[in-house]
């Protein structure tokens, strides 16, 4: 890879940063809300699965105990 001097590097970085499409405030808000919703749904799902497994194991163990 060819080496560039620091001035060229900074110019290239500024050029690349100029190409970035930044999300709008609304997009950030909607994405954040969706993350919280999905985290809540996932937590509820795993809590229900955990309760189901716990109940099943208690049922099976009560047969032998």
Image (cartoon, helix red, strand yellow):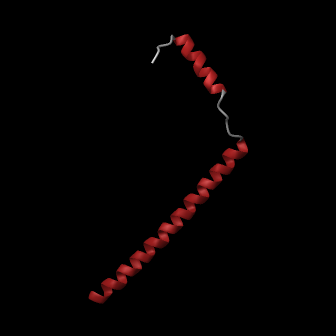
From the viewer's perspective, is residue 39 above or below residue 56? above
- Quadrant (top left, top right, bottom left, bottom right) of the C terminus: bottom left
Of residues 34 and 3, the one drawn nearer to the viewer in this rendering:
3
| Extreme-bottom residue of the structure | 63
Depth order, front residue of 50/23? 23
Query: Splitting the image into 4 quarters, where does residue 57 fall?
Result: bottom left
- x and y percentages locating residue 43 in the rendered image: 51, 63
Of all residues, the one furthest to the front in this rendering is 1
- What x and y, as percent, mark residue 42? 53, 63
Q: Position of residue 44 (x, y in %)?
A: 53, 67
Q: Quadrant of residue 7?
A: top right
Question: Which residue is depicted at the point 66% across and 26% down?
Answer: 18
| Above or below for 62 versus 52 | below
Q: Residue at x 72, y 45 (%)?
A: 26
Q: Residue at x 50, y 12 (%)?
A: 4
Residue at (36%, 85%) from the top-left corner?
59
Q: Count every numbered label the image shows and give the total.
A: 0
């Amino acid at each position: 890879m060819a080496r560039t001097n620091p001035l060229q590097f900074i110019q290239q970085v500024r050029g690349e940063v100029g190409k970035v499409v930044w999300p709008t405030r609304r997009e950030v808000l909607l994405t954040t809300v969706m993350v919280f919703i999905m985290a809540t749904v996932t937590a509820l799902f795993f809590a229900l699965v955990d309760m189901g497994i716990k109940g099943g194991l208690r049922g099976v163990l009560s047969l032998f105990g």
